[in-house]
Amino acid sequence: MTITTGYIISALLLFGIGMNGLMTCSHQLRKILAVNLMASGVFLILIVTGFGTDGSAIDHVPHAMVLTGIVISVSTTALALTLACRIQQRLNRSADETAEGNDDD
Amino acid sequence: MNGGLTGMKKRKQSMKGKFKRKDWQFATLTSLLIATLVTFLCWAILKEPPGEDLTAEALAPLFVQSGVTSPVTAILLNFRGYDTLLEVMVLFLAGLGIWSQATVDPTNPLVFSSPATHPTKPNFHGPGPELILATLVRILIPLMVLVAGYLTWAGGFQAGGAFQGGALLGGAGILLILAEPQRISTIPPALIRFGIVLGPAIFLLVGVSCFGYGGNFLQYPQPGAGSWLLLIEFGAAISIGITLTTLFVGGRPDPKRLKGTDQP
Amino acid sequence: MIEPASLAPWLIIIPLAGGLLAFLLPSRSVLIGLSATVANGLLALAITFYSINTIPLEYALGGWPPPAGILLRIDGLTLVMLTMTAITGLAISIYAQGYFPARIGSGNGVSRHGPQQDFFWPLWLMLLAGLNGLFLAGDLFNLYVTLEVTALAAVALTALSGKHTSEVAALRYLLVSLLGSLSYLFGTVLLYRACHVLHLATLGALIVSSPVVWSGLALITVGLLLKTALFPMHFWLPPAHVNALTPVSAILSALVIKASFYLIFRFWGDVFMRILPLGGYSLLGGLGAAAVLWGGIQALRQKRLKMLIAYSTVAQLGYLFIALPIIRHDAGPSSRFALVYLIISHAGAKAAMFLAAGNVFLHFGHDRINELAGVKDALPMTSFALAVAGVSLMGLPPSGGFIGKWLLLTASFASGQWWWGIILIAGSLLAVAYIYRVVRHLFTKAPGPSSGKRQVARTMEASSLFLAVLSLVMGIFAPLVSKLIASDAVSLASLLAGVVP
């Protein structure tokens, strides 16, 4: 029972830290990472839901749901990263144009 | 809630240490609210033991009919196969979405070609892969493909399956691209498209062909459901591997920089 | 005689297959896209026609009934949503078929617009599959997957215009959407912990109040509210809808927003109505009232036509939420019918307005409201479509918007909640004001000779006019829709009485 409690508390902490990061961080990469933290929290609690109090796997439905969730999370993260890269590139370009020769990596 | 896009300009500002007081207040307030939410959820979940599990009991006798012995695979591909079909489509959508947003230089896919203004940087590996890297790739890639095949097949009776196998294939693809970035320009884009579509298409076709056996959508014919599942798994694994690699590349090959291919 | 339920999976198979094919064969994407949307439209009409007397229907995917498998469920509301999506989607597709060549016709950057068209069709078909799947889903987790299919396709479509502003808007839309869907998933997990059931109808019958269940329902609701852009969570909507390509703006505003609202209606007006607190309904109604007023005032202040239309969406969404507390206190099906009517007439009118605004933008190269004089002479059908759609948004008779608002007004007074009625009237007055701002300029003569930049195809004008007229004469479908919604109310009554299906 204590192990399950520990899992649940850490899952909620992950979810909360992720949500906090999403709300307060201004950098897009951090926001994307924060969403992934939130997702990990949800997946963790889903895994715990599948286990009985004695730690044996009794319900496999949540585990199948986690696998589905992970693939969806990978997909959304990839799209978000591509969009963030595109936005950053354009900003770099406009910064380059304004800086005009100012070496600025 | 401006979504604060952080570009060069903003970063320069923050580097100067110009933190606004309002931002701090907002951050503190948000953190406090979230802390309250987490504490409440913690209390609510721990206070109450999980409910009586009716699903697990109802499912137990059905696993025999699923065609596989691994319960997770039985749920993923048979009982809730529709979820998995849509999930494969989500991965396809990610690839589709990324291809619709960005193009990469096929002679060096690690550099975005559009809307780049930086001149294409020379490949950091020099003219070709280094000897150690080349040898490593030569040994590792076939091994990874072999293990990926085994993992996919093993999903029928133990931990494993299309996603694990596909992830490994994706890893092999990424390794290959890191080692020999120019290699991608020799692959015709139509072939990549075909590879991305293959798995979802097989899944959909198998689902539709179940109508031919008088069943519902995705109701595999009863004796031999296992072989249908294996077909789906291998198709899915191949496409997942290819899609993950294209996600890593982060864009479609730029047709303007591609010579002698069928891309219009 | 065809078994109507057996047609249901084809609503998912056809768009999915079309999406895969359109990606595989980019040179044929227009043909594939149009055929798939036509087939989808015919199929939706056929299912509605065949199953109108036999709803609710269920279809066990994979032949596994719950709790092992996933059900598709068809009831009156599902049929209305499917048909609305199919018809609006078909008109938008016909518009898109002319739109991309018209953009290329401007001369510059053929190579830039070609890929946009090639990727529009597969993305739109995948979005259609997600929407159909969402309306048909009878399973809490399957809904999460369909929500994600819809969201990913919608985000990729938003960014398709390739402008910096639309990419920024798309990323913000994606992050908001992910926060929403993770919140939804967390809620699902909590409900699953409590009941160990994912099948919606069983869940609705089994569920009992407890802190975990409340938390789960609250998380699910907040997640969906974020995706529906209810005030004050609407901040992401105007930039995303305005900066997208015209057909995409129409799809997002008319259909995608409705998908997450449909779920809120499904949960608050149907599955979990038995245990949800009355205060929650009042809260949603209050936020809806704020949205009506705020969206209306913002729409009045906009200088650009597309921005005005986007803020009008924020306001019109408010009406849908005001309907929830009225439905909760109204015994008869008439307020449910009113809400459904508001949903479908807004879909038609809003899509028509976005398409018409797109025509104006293509032809004149801008959409500044104060410089719209002369649109009538250059684009007669488009200006007519804008005016007609405006009538429906204002809620003047005989439009669909009028029927919805009138029935809601009657129900709010009948159930003693007159304050919602006052908001409805205030919102309509605001709508009259902001629509008048547009229409006033449309029918004035241009000061100088018209300076058309690009030719707008007739199909593009016609599809926008078709949708506008459809939302105006929607009254003729009232008997059909009311029959569908009334049959839902019967099965709802048995759920509220606590009968396990």
Image (cartoon, rainbow, N blue to C red):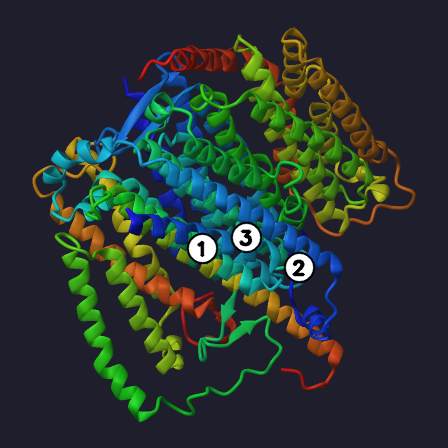
Q: Mark 1 lies on which chain?
A: A
Tell me where residue B24 sits by quadrant.
bottom right
Tell me where residue C235 sits by quadrant.
top right
Q: Mark 3 lies on which chain?
A: C
Pointer 3 residue:
C175
Q: Are marks 3 and 1 on the same chain?
A: no
The percent coordinates of residue C13 (x first, y second) are 34, 39
Question: Callout 3, which amino acid?
Answer: Leu
Check disc 2 and report its element: helix, strand or loop: loop
Pointer 1 residue:
A14
Q: How crowded is mark 1: few (under 14 residues within 10 Å), some or many (20 or more)?
A: many
Question: Callout 1, which amino acid?
Answer: Leu
Q: Is residue C122 left or right of residue B159?
A: right
Q: Can residue C25 be seen in this view?
A: no
Pointer 2 residue:
B4
State the quadrant of the N terminus of chain C. top left
Q: In this view, does C491 lie to the left or right of C6?
A: right
Q: How far apart are marks 2 and 1 (CA)?
A: 23 Å
Q: Distance between the residues labelled 3 and 1?
A: 17 Å
Using the image, tell me which numbered label, if any, was put on residue C227. Answer: none
Check disc 1 and report its element: helix, strand or loop: helix
The percent coordinates of residue C327 (x first, y second) are 56, 16
Q: How crowded is mark 3: few (under 14 residues within 10 Å), some or many (20 or more)?
A: many
Direction right: furthest residue: C447
Q: In this view, does A58 lie above or below C155?
A: above
Give me the residue at 70% from left, 55% from top: B25
The percent coordinates of residue A15 (x first, y second) are 46, 51
